């Protein structure tokens, strides 16, 4: 009982913590929700225009981010993607629209395995 009280107090005073039980599965859905929230704070959604000559950068977007849409346009590859803030910073010169909703066709986004 004392361990339960101490654990609840620790969770209550520790940022982004959740209580879960491996034995009963209690709290697992809350854990998944919290993970989603924490990752969301560390991601930035952007629309990029990357020249065809920089396929390496497109690969980074698929490897480290989540591509929601892709369009192969005459002037380059247009991507609607979420990515870690550090990667968005490195690709800042290719950002044409930060924090936009998806405007590219998600069906045209190849999977990361492609």
Image (cartoon, rainbow, N blue to C red):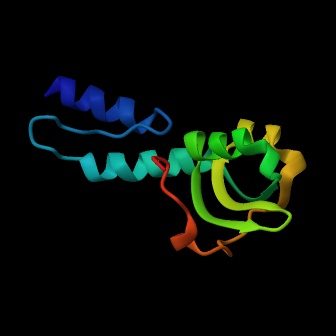
In percent of the image, x 68 and y 75: which residue is there?
103
Q: Is residue 63 left or right of residue 4?
A: right
Residue 43 appears in the rendering: no
Which is nearer the eye, 75 or 97? 75
Q: Is residue 83 left or right of residue 11?
A: right
The extreme left residue here reads 23
Q: Is residue 86 left or right of residue 9?
A: right
Q: Quadrant of residue 45?
A: bottom right
Seen in the picture, residue 106 relative to 61 is either above or below; the reply is below
In percent of the image, x 68 and y 47: which residue is there?
58
Q: Quadrant of residue 72?
A: bottom right
Residue 40 appears in the rendering: yes
Q: Is residue 61 left or right of residue 93?
A: left
How many numbered marks are there?
A: 0
In percent of the image, x 78 and y 57: which residue is there?
48
In percent of the image, x 66 and y 73: which residue is there?
104
Seen in the picture, residue 29 relative to 106 is either above or below; the reply is above
Residue 4 image offset from top left, x and y in percent: 20, 30
Q: Quadrant of residue 59?
A: top right
């Amino acid at each position: 009982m004392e361990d339960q009280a101490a654990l609840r107090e620790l969770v209550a005073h520790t940022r982004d913590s959740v209580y879960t039980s491996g034995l009963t599965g209690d709290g697992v859905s809350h854990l998944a929700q919290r993970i989603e929230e924490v990752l969301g704070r560390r991601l930035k959604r952007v629309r990029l225009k990357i020249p065809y000559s920089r396929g390496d950068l497109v690969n980074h977007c698929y490897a480290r981010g989540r591509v929601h849409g892709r369009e192969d346009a005459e002037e380059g590859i247009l991507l609607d993607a979420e990515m870690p803030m550090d990667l968005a910073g490195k690709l800042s010169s290719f950002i044409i629209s930060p924090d936009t909703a998806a405007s590219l066709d998600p069906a045209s986004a190849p999977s990361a395995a492609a």
